[in-house]
Image (cartoon, coloured by chain):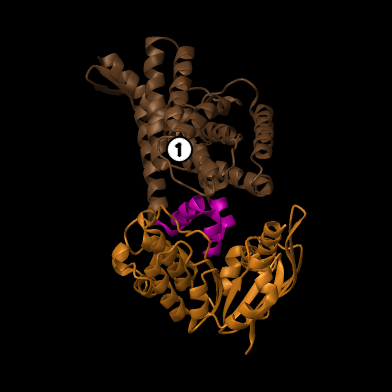
Amino acid sequence: MDIYLSQVFTGLSIGSVLLLIALGLTFTFGQMGVINLAHGELIMAGAYTAYMVGGVFGESVSLLVALPVAFALAGTMGLVLERVLIRRLYGRPLDTLLVTWGVSLLLQQVARDIFGAPNVNAKAPEWLGGGVVVAGATLPYARLFIIALVALSVTGIWLYMTRLPQGRRMRAVMQNRQLAAVSGIATQAVDQRTFFIGSGLAGMAGVALTLLGPIGPSLGTAYIVDAFLVVVAGGLGQLRGAVFAAIGLGVIQSLVEFKTQASLAKVLCFVAVVALLQVRPQGLVSVRSRALT
Amino acid sequence: MTTLLEVRDLEVVFDGFRAIDNLDLTVAEGEVRFLIGPNGAGKTTLIDVVTGLTSPAGGTVTFAGQSLLGLPEHKIVRLGVGRTFQTASVFEQLTVVENLDLAANFRQPLRALLRRRKGVSDAVDAALTTVGLVDQADRLAEVLSHGQKQWLEIGMLLVQDPHLLLLDEPVAGMSKEERTRTGELLHEIARTRTVVVVEHDMEFLRRFANCVTVMHEGSVLCEGTVAEVQADERVQEVYLGRSRDKRSTAEVG
C-alpha cells in the first residue's frame, strides 16, 4: 500500500510541474491562438537560472532567490519573443509553429554555448533533504515543496483572473477579442501581460525541475509534449481543466510506470488522451468561444 | 447642426471584392440615422471601419474633426464611439456586472473594479436599471435570454458614455414586446446622443428614424425621410424590383 501512496505522490508532484508549464501554454493558445514551441526553452532558462543563482548565493537560500529571478527572466524572454516575432504572426498558426520551433532550437544552442552540452546540477538546499513518513511511505520534502509551490502559483493565478481588473480583461480578451477591443480594452497590452505571466510560470517550473533532476540544454523538450497533452486534455485557456488534466496525467503515468515501464506508461497516457478527446473534443472543461471557432 | 461623423470616398476591398465603393456619409450631431440596404450592401463593414475593426483601402473617416483611420479599436472607443454587434455579443463567462464593469473600465478609477456588486459604480448601477437587468446582475451572461443579452450589450455601451452609438441590428431576433422595450430604450438614449442604427424592421424604422440612408452594393443609393425613401424608385428596384421583374418575365415567357 505504501508503495502505491508514494507513486501517487510522485505523480502528483510531476503533475504539478506539468501544470505550471501548461498554464502558460494554455493561456497563450487560448487567448492568442499561438502555439509557442519555444515554451520549453523558457523552462530550461529557468532551470539554468537556478543553477547560476546557486553559484552566487548560498545553497540554503538560492532556491528562494531563484524563483522570482527565473519568473522575471523567463517572463521577459517571453515578452521579447512576443513583441519581436510572435506579434507579427497572429492569425497565422502554422507560421508561428515554425518560427517558435526555430527559436527553440536557437535557444538550446545558446545554452549549449554558454553552459556546455553536458548536464549540470543545481544543489538542492539541505532543508529539502529527507522527507516525511506517512503510512509507511516516505514523501520527500523536495516534492512536497514543488506541490506547495504550484498550489500557491495556481491560487495566485486564479485570484489574478477573478479578482483583479487585469485578470478580468484577460478573460474578456480570451472570450471575445473583438468585443473586448470595442469595449475599450487595449488588447495588445493584455496579450503582452499574458505572455509575460505564462512565460514566467515556465521559468518557475524550470527552477522546480532542478529539484528532481539534472539540467541540460534540451530539458524543455522532455516536458513540452506532456504539457501540450495537458492543454489539449484540459480544454483551451481553462485553469480548472488544466489542473484536472495535469494531476490526472501525472498520477496515471507514475502508477502505470511503476507497474510496467516508462515507455508503456507514455503510450497509455497518449491513448488515454486520445480516448478522452473522442468523448470530449474540447477537453475536460470547455467554453463556447467565438475567437477560437 | 454640426457634423459629428464624416465619411468620404470610402473604399473597402476584401480579396478583390469591393465591399464598400466610394461611399460618402455625413451624420450630424444629435441625429438618429438609420442605415438600410439589402444583404451585402456594406452596412456592417461601414461600422467595422468606423470602429477600427477593418481598415479601408482608401478614403477618410472623421469623428468630431479627428481622423479615426489607423487608430486601434480601444482608442476609438475612448474617443466616444461605441458599437454593438449583429449577434448579441457579450462576455458569456462573466457575470452581468462584470461585463458592465469591463466596458466602464476606462471611465472609472481602477479600484472601482475591485468592488463587488454592493458597491458597483454609479454608471454601472444606472445602466443596470436602464436596461432592466438589476435582478440578473450576478448571473453569468450566458444564461440570459437573447433579448437580455442585446440589452446588456446596450448597457455596456451606456456605461462607456459614447457620443456616437453604432447599433448593428439591435432588434434582430427579438419578440414583439422586446422590440418595443428596445425601441423605448433607444429613444431614451438618443435624446442626448447621436445614433446610427442598422435595422430592417420597418415598423421600428417608421417610429424612430428621422433620416434614412439606403445602401446598395457598397455605396449610398439615396437618403431622406422614411416616406421619401419608400417612394424612391431606385430603392424599390433594389429591394424588390429586379428579382420580381425576372420572375414575372419568366412567368410571362
Residue bounds of the magenta highlight? A164-193
Horizontal arrangement in the rendering, residue B111 relative to residue B203 (left or right): left
Q: Does the magenta stretch include residue A189?
A: yes
Percent position of residue A249, x then y: 41, 26
Q: In this view, does B8 lie above or below B95?
A: below
Horizontal arrangement in the rendering, residue A226 relative to residue B246 (left or right): left
Secondary structure type for disc 1? loop
- State which quarter of the image contains the C terminus of chain B: bottom right
User: Which residue is painted at 62% across and 61% down in the image?
Assistant: B39
Percent position of residue A124, x then y: 44, 27
Horizontal arrangement in the rendering, residue A137 relative to residue B142 (left or right): left
Q: Residue furthest left?
A: A135
| Chain letter, orange | B
Residue closest to the eye, A72 or B123: B123
User: Which residue is painted at 57% across and 43% down in the image?
Assistant: A33
Residue closest to the eye, B55 or A34: B55
Would you name the residue on which mark 1 appears? A235
Horizontal arrangement in the rendering, residue A266 relative to residue B244 (left or right): left
Q: Is residue B34 magenta?
A: no
For badge 1, the amino acid type reads: Gly
Residue closest to the eye, B222 or A71: B222
- State which quarter of the image contains the N terminus of chain B: bottom right
Q: Is residue A160 above or below residue B132?
A: above
Answer whether residue B139 is visible to the viewer in this image.
yes
Percent position of residue B241, x then y: 67, 67
Q: Which residue lies furthest to the top in this view?
A: A260
Residue closest to the eye, B137 or A16: B137
Answer whether residue B6 is visible to the viewer in this image.
no
